[in-house]
Image (cartoon, rainbow, N blue to C red):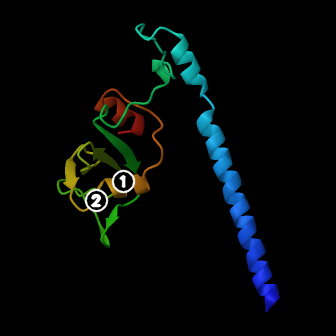
């Protein structure tokens, strides 16, 4: 029985020692000056420093606010709630282009260029089923040409 108490006391001592070592390490890091702070105090603060951007403009990806939407091909029949979705105008049921617009609405476009808004689908569905964006297109026509429509 006393062995149990001794083991617990040793474990507590080990835990307290680790806590003290961690506190000492935090204190040491709090007292050390950071490399940026030494340089900032050395240079004149009235001068505005020009910092170049991390990536050149050619490598930057447009943000979600910069693009009107995303599109992907959907060649197989689109099944929503157990029903095959058809174009209301021409009856096509495959070879869709699925658009996810900035307002998180999803639109379908058939091969005959009929567009319908799909109320059941949302941006979460689109994000689950689309892959990574492979290209950025300045116009809708360029994007449709890239997708083969």
Label 2 or label 1, whichever comes before in sequence order = 2
Tell me what residue is drawn at x 47 percent, y 8 percent: 44
Name the image quarter holding residue 11.
Answer: bottom right
Relative placement, left or right, of 77 versus 104 is right
Name the image quarter holding residue 26.
Answer: top right
Q: Is residue 3 above or below residue 65?
A: below
Secondary element under disc 2, as helix, strand or loop, is loop
Q: CA distance from mark 2 to mark 1?
A: 8 Å
* Residue 126 badge: 1
The percent position of residue 36, horizontal first and vertical second, equals 56, 23
The percent position of residue 61, horizontal first and vertical second, equals 43, 30
In this view of the protein, can residue 9 be seen by the observer?
Answer: yes
**Crowd tier of the residue under label 2, counting other residues whose Cα lies within 10 Å: few below 14, some 14–19, many 20 or above:** some
The percent position of residue 143, horizontal first and vertical second, equals 36, 34
| Pointer 2 with pointer 1, Cβ within 8 A | yes
Quadrant (top left/top right/bottom left/bottom right) for the C terminus? top left
Relative placement, left or right, of 86 versus 74 is left
Q: Is residue 82 above or below residue 99?
A: below
Q: Can you name the residue that lies furthest to the bottom here? A: 1
Q: Nearer the viewer, residue 16 or 52?
A: 16
Q: Nearer the viewer, residue 40 or 110?
A: 40
Q: Is residue 146 above or below residue 24?
A: above
Tell me what residue is drawn at x 45 percent, y 11 percent: 50
The residue identified by callout 2 is 121
The percent position of residue 46, horizontal first and vertical second, equals 40, 8
């Amino acid at each position: 029985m006393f062995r149990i108490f001794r083991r617990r006391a040793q474990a507590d001592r080990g835990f307290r020692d680790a806590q003290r070592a961690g506190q000492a390490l935090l204190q040491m890091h709090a007292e050390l000056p950071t490399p940026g702070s030494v340089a900032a105090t050395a240079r004149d603060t009235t001068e505005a420093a020009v910092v170049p951007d991390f990536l050149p403009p050619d490598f930057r990806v447009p943000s979600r606010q910069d693009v009107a939407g995303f599109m992907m091909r959907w060649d197989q029949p689109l099944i929503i709630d157990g029903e095959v979705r058809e174009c209301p105008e021409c009856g096509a049921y495959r070879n869709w282009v699925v658009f996810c617009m900035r307002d998180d609405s999803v639109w379908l476009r058939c091969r005959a260029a009929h567009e319908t808004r799909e109320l059941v689908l949302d941006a979460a569905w689109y994000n689950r089923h689309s892959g990574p964006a492979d290209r950025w297109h300045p116009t809708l026509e360029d994007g449709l040409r890239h997708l083969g429509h």
